[in-house]
Amino acid sequence: MSNTFFLLFSVDLLLLFCFMFMPVIRGADAFFGVRVSAETYRNEGRRILHRYWFWLALTFIEIEAIGFIVSFYRGRTEFAEVAPRLLVLPVAMLFYVIFYKQAKRLELVEGDERFASSLRTRHLRDYTNLALEGAVVALTITPILVLVYYYPQLPERIPTHWNWRGLPDQWTRKSYFSVFSLAGVLVYMQGLMLFVKHGLLGVKMTLPAEHTEEYLSLKEEMLGMTIKFLDWTRLVLCIMLGSVTANIAFSAIDYLRFLSKIVTIAVWASTALLLAAVAFAIYSFYKADRRLREEVGRVYVQRHRDAKHWYLGGLIYYNPEDPALWVEKLVGWGYTFNMGNKWVYIYLVIMIAVPLLLILPLERVG
């Protein structure tokens, strides 16, 4: 069984977990993106949810079984191992939309509600940890300097991938592009995440007319947790990608190979830290949601004119008249793009095109 199989299986399992719990994270406030009564949520809603879970899990098992079978033919075609997994996300979205339509008929129709808007201005300096930023800069620059210094000593055949034990298993020809492409990814990731952080500071918040101050305080706390998680993720990615970047020199030059073991430890440690950070973030959001429900009675509010701009059961928000680039998710935790804002497509191009331009042209050699 290849490393690719277990990596793809882990990604698919994460997607399954997200889609299974996305409809119920906000409870009756956004059940499949629809506000329902508490009684409906506990009764008919549960029956819809259980059917959704059954079909989602059954399809996941079938796709993974196909992936398991074709993984034995990896020597014949690598694409065969990946292709079945391409079905997981679209199939999960399809099931979500099907059951959203069932939940839609249970929607709670409420009378006119009053809302408020936050006038608070957020500044980047208030969400910046100088010590962390210094560490990120140092961990970004150091691997690049290592490659610059050792570039003349690198052989004509350099490693570009390592197995779980830290041993090279893929190589390519030496060139400025092949040597510094991972360094480019490292710099790109930091720039992108800073771009996202800056954008999140302008996220729109709709507030209930009652318990407004308590609601705003907890929502701002959740935004702060999101940005703090983003910052610590940047730091961990610096350790992970920076170590791998420097490992091009460490594993290619004989007298530096002892450092490859340190890189392997750093990669596994940073992976464990990242998983722990994700778990802690999920738990923190869960606690914040509980406090919102206890103190305010609701974990999510929105104006009626905004509600009609959510599509596919709250998976996509499209409102050209809304100037906000980021909005709070209707289902799940966190924030998502307003697809009606033209600037979002610049984000998407940067997020998708740049990594492909940096990675895909690498040519493997035996």
Image (cartoon, rainbow, N blue to C red):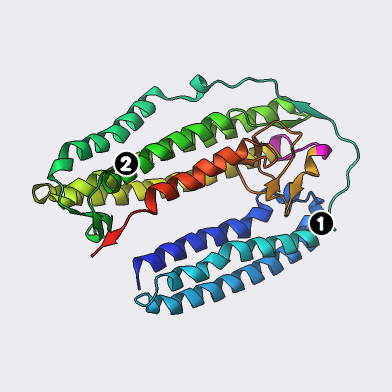
* Amino acid carrying mark 1 in the image: Lys
Give the residue at x 61% y 29%: 220
Which residue is identified by label 2? 183
For the residues marked 1 and 2, what is the alpha-carbon distance in whole angstroms?
48 Å
Left or right: residue 320 versus residue 5 is right
Which residue is identified by label 1? 104
Residues in magenta, as a range: 294-305
Among numbered discs 1 and 2, the one appearing first in the sequence? 1
Whether residue 90 appears in magenta in the rendering, the answer is no
Give the residue at x 88% y 43%: 110
Q: Position of residue 251 (x, y in %)?
A: 18, 52
Q: Is residue 127 above or below residue 36?
A: above
- Numbered circle sitting on residue 170: none
Q: Quarter-wise, where is residue 171 in the image?
A: bottom left
Q: Is residue 183 above or below residue 268?
A: above
Q: Among all residues in the image, which is located at the extreme left?
A: 255
Left or right: residue 142 versus residue 136 is left
